[in-house]
Image (cartoon, rainbow, N blue to C red):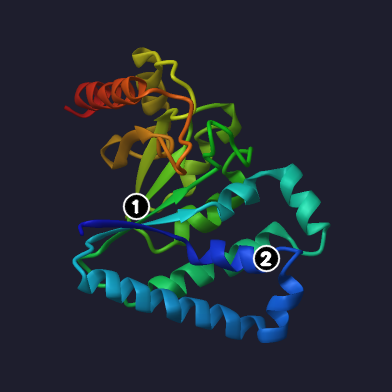
Amino acid sequence: MAKQTIPAPAQLLAELFREDNARNTRRFYPDLEELIQDIAAAYRTVIADLYAAGCRNLQLDDCTWGMFCDKTYWEARQKENVSVDEEAERYLRLNNLALAGAPEDLVITTHVCRGNYHSAWASSGGYEPIGKYLFSSEHVSAFYLEFDDERSGGFEPLRFVSDDKKVVLGLITTKSPVLEDKAQVIARIHEAARYVPLDRLYLSPQCGFASCEIGNRLTEEDQWAKLALVKEIAEEVWG
């Protein structure tokens, strides 16, 4: 087993504290810090077990940050009870606690997912609210970021990406069978390179072709065409 994808610790905490189950969670964990430490410890155990089983590439699938970017969602859910900054710092700390002590030869990356059910999406908004936290300070090697349409905003938040991290640009959508224009994709890669050097940029589909049994509204042929386009563009841009 070379690669494994698991939900991010911050996403688990966010789910536990949804309005419909936060009350029950607090019965078991009246102290939030105790819950954070226990989640982090559990993830460290899972990571160690995956490594022992042969995993050398671990990807965190993290929907939490995409929701931070969605102003409408945030205002409806939080009701001004907490600030984005306060929660971002908490979730960043939890993720880093979970990754503490990971083996040096284990590549750890994270995907900021914005929803991927039957070509639908869950969140909208640029990365500016989270850039100074996630991009600068999460202890991962690379970020897989969705940039396939206007919902993801511009590339300006990439200025927060620290010099030791890579960015995989999800410029090829998995939600539509329409094949992207190669020249436009290449132009967007060079636009992103204004903020992160080209040698630390990569290209991929924006998300998986099937995050559930239903999958997205593409045929198998559509999917292979998308992957072929990624390969063609990568060879032209990076050689």
Name which quarter of the figure residue 197 lies in. Answer: top left
Query: Where 192 falls versus 25 (above or below)?
Result: above
Q: Which residue is pictured at 19% across the width and 66% down the height?
A: 54
Q: Which amino acid, by three-letter code, is at mark 2?
A: Glu
Position of the C terminus by quadrant: top left
Q: Which residue is pictured at 50% across the width and 56% down the height?
A: 134
Residue at 57% across, 43% down: 127
Rendered image: mark on residue 22: none
Q: Quadrant of the N terminus?
A: bottom left
Nearer-N-terminus badge (2/1): 2
Q: Where is residue 72 in the image (x, y as percent from the top left)?
A: 75, 43
Q: In this view, does 165 lie to the left or right of 34?
A: left
Q: Is mark 1 on a helix, strand or loop?
A: loop
The disc placed on residue 165 is: 1
Q: Which amino acid does label 1 sit on?
A: Lys
Residue 176: x and y, percent?
48, 22
Residue 102 visible within the image: no
- Give the x, y percent position of residue 154: 54, 32
Q: Nearer the viewer, residue 127 or 24?
A: 24
**Furthest residue to the left?**
239
Q: In this view, does 63 lie above or below 123?
A: below
- Disc number placed over residue 86 in the picture, else none: 2
